[in-house]
Image: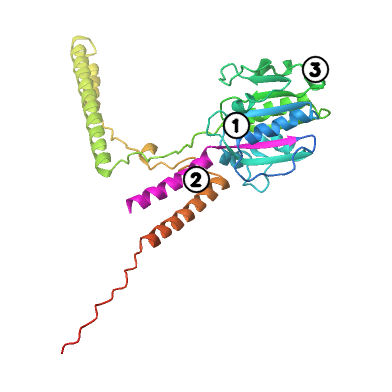
């Protein structure tokens, strides 16, 4: 039975690992380059390399733009593009969605194998374009050994405009910042596409270098204040305030006696003595302030502010893999149970000998 459970666990992890390790590709072009709008099977880096090589060898495209996210999983695309909303305009990638839908041809590849951890850089290392221009942040660790020139992402306008009309297939790789400000990434894509323009034959791709790690957020409620704790806190507060009021009363009594002594020495001793006694009486009758305890807002049970109370995998792709993996696990366990059923051999009793 332990072997069966181990086999099911390994099968589940293989399927889930293939989904988590995948990155997406969105491609759009000013030409009819893509025959399919969507490729549903798992795409290999060698296939993407062959696609880029065919575009370079055809020489009908002037510029190839690669927009590379440092970390992005396939199942995150639906959330970033606000695909679940009926009136979505692209979410944080509204300009990217517009370029994708208005292009002459486009393709969506949801599952690209990136187990190596260097999807785009490994593909570029096997290509031989005329010129390779890399635009990135100074802190980015994206390899630039094979680049013709490297530009800062803050100086996109410094790209040479000659690459738009030199008759060669040049590649512009834009490594987007390693942060979650995807609206900023959308603006960078818009700026590069505006640099290329609509009169230039181009092919653009949006993808990722590696799939991002799966984040699970747990929110634990704070320790609640019990009634016993509240009463003890109230008692300690009242005792401390009472001692303070007693001290203040004794101080006022001392001041009253001092004023009485000084009044007996002066001419208006009677009046000052009366005032001193009044101050003594007032000090002795000073009411002790009662402590007011208000329930603090922190003692109440906190309510999570964000809707993702426990963030599992999002997106339809991972959900599909979960359902398929569960069904396969049930099928596999059923086959194992059937294999364990042993039908006993037919037992034939020996022939009885007749007794004479």
Q: Quadrant of residue 38?
A: top right
In what element is the residue under mark 2? helix
Mark 1 surroundings: few (<14), some (14-19) or many (≥20) residues within 10 A:
many
Q: Nearer the viewer, residue 221 or 34?
A: 34
Tell me if 100 is positioned left or right of 351 in this view.
right
C-alpha span from label 3 to label 1: 28 Å
Residue 285 visible in the current orientation: no
Q: Residue at x 28, y 40 (%)?
A: 230
Q: At x 72% / y 25%, what residue is drawn?
A: 192
The Cα–Cα distance between marks 1 and 2, rounded to whole angstroms, is 21 Å
> Of circles 3 and 2, which is in front?
2
Q: Position of residue 7 (x, y in %)?
A: 40, 49
- Measure the C-alpha gap from mark 3 to mark 2: 47 Å
- Boundaries of the magenta span: 1-28
Q: Secondary structure at mark 3?
A: helix
Marks 3 and 2, the one that precedes in the sequence: 2
Residue at which label 2 appears: 15
Direction bottom: furthest residue:
356
Residue that label 1 marks = 208
- How packed mark 2 is, by other alpha carbons closer than 10 Å (few <14, some 14-19, many 20 or more), is some
Query: Is the residue 268 above or below the residue 72 in the image?
Result: above
Residue 122 horizontal/vertical position (percent): 59, 27
Residue lying at 32% horizontally and 69% vertically, measured from the top left: 345
The label shown at residue 227 is none
Earlier along the polypeptide chain: callout 3 or callout 1? 3
């Amino acid at each position: 039975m332990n072997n069966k459970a181990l086999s099911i666990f390994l099968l589940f992890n293989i399927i889930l690992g293939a989904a988590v390790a995948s990155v997406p590709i969105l491609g759009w072009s000013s030409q009819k380059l893509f025959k399919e709008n969507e490729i549903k099977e798992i795409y290999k880096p060698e296939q993407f390399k062959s696609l880029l090589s065919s575009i370079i060898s055809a020489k009908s495209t002037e510029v190839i733009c690669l927009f590379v996210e440092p970390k992005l999983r396939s199942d995150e695309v639906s959330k970033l593009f606000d695909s679940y909303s009926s009136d979505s305009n692209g979410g944080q990638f509204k300009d990217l969605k517009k370029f994708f839908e208005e292009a002459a041809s486009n393709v969506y590849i949801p599952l690209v194998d990136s187990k190596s951890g260097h999807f785009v850089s490994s593909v570029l290392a096997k290509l031989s374009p005329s010129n390779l221009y890399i635009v990135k942040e100074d802190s980015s660790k994206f390899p630039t050994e094979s680049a013709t020139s490297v530009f800062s992402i803050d100086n996109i306008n410094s790209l040479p405009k000659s690459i738009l009309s030199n008759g060669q297939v040049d590649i512009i790789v834009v490594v987007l910042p390693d942060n979650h400000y995807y609206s900023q990434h959308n603006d960078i894509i818009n700026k590069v596409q505006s640099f290329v323009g609509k009169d230039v034959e181009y092919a653009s791709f949006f993808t990722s270098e590696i799939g991002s790690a799966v984040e699970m957020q747990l929110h634990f409620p704070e320790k609640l204040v019990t009634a016993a704790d509240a009463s003890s806190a109230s008692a300690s507060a009242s005792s401390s305030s009472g001692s303070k009021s007693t001290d203040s009363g004794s101080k006022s009594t001392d001041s009253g006696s001092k004023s009485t002594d000084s009044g007996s020495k002066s001419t208006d001793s009677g009046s000052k003595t009366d005032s001193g006694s009044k101050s003594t009486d007032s000090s002795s009758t000073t009411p002790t302030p009662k402590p007011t305890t208000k329930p603090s807002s922190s003692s109440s049970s906190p309510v999570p502010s964000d809707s993702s109370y426990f963030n599992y995998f999002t997106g339809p792709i991972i959900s599909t893999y979960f359902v398929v993996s569960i069904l396969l696990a049930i099928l596999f366990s059923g086959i194992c149970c059937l294999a364990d059923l042993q039908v006993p051999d037919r037992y034939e009793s020996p022939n009885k000998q007749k007794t004479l």
